Image (cartoon, helix red, strand yellow):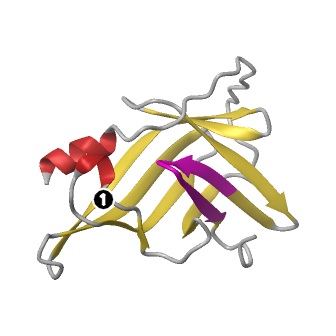
Amino acid sequence: MRALVAALALLPLVAACSDDITAPAELPADLVGAYQLVSIDGGELPANVGFVLGVQRRTEVVDGAIELTADARFTDVTRFRVHHPDGIAYDEFNFANQGYVFLRDGGMEFRPVGLPAHRMTLLRSGDVTLLVQQWNGYELRYAQVGARAPL
């Protein structure tokens, strides 16, 4: 299990390329707060994300959340479920990271401590704010807590 946790920490995240970065001293007030993972590839959670990094056990994302603070920091926690080969038993664990967030080209760049930076697209429609991330071939959508139904 430790090997799987370590492997998940190294999941390929797309590092951003542009140099157009704004490092705010604080985030705009309307972006600050909690975001809940609401879908993966448009489907409900838990979502099967296949066999991660060659581990021959079915892996699911159970839930996830991101917290953005006014001082441009973030905390990201994702709960995974890894099924044993018997198909009955499973292990659950949380993968958490934290770091700084930067406004960038209409989106946000997340720079977790000790991991590669990754980008999330920022979508807004009325009072709904979504963060959209491409991860390991999947699209993850996080809706700001308190918003109405996600897009």
Q: Residue at x 60, y 50 (%)?
A: 133
Q: Is residue 99 left or right of residue 19?
A: left
Q: Position of residue 31 (x, y in %)?
A: 71, 52
Residue at image position (25%, 48%) is 54
Question: Mark 1 falls on what kind of element?
Answer: strand
* Residue 23 is a magenta residue: no
Q: Position of residue 63 (x, y in %)?
A: 43, 69
Location of residue 91 by image quarter: bottom left
On the image, the x and y values in percent for residue 93 come to 25, 62
Placement of the C terminus among the 4 image quadrants: bottom right
Q: Is residue 47 above or below residue 124?
A: below
Q: Residues within 10 Å of mark 1 (few under 14, many from 20)?
A: some
Residue, disc 1: 94
**View extreme (top): residue:** 19
In this rendering, the answer to whether 138 lies above or below 16 is below
Q: Residue furthest right?
A: 126
Residue 103: image quadrant is: top right
Residue type for callout 1: Asn
Seen at 60% across and 62% down, the residue is 142
In the drawing, does residue 141 fall left or right of residue 95? right
Q: Residue 4: percent from the left, percent from the top?
A: 20, 50
In the image as oriented, which residue stretches furthest toward the bottom?
88
Q: Quadrant of the N terminus?
A: bottom left
- Left or right: residue 4 versus residue 38 is left
Give the side of residue 87 with respect to residue 61, left or right.
Answer: left
User: Which span is picked out in magenta?
Assistant: 131-143
The residue nearer to you, when weighing 92 against 65, is: 92
How many numbered marks appear?
Answer: 1
Against 93, residue 31 (above or below) is above
Q: Looking at the image, which residue is at 54% across and 34% down? A: 14
Looking at the magenta stretch, what is its main secondary structure? strand
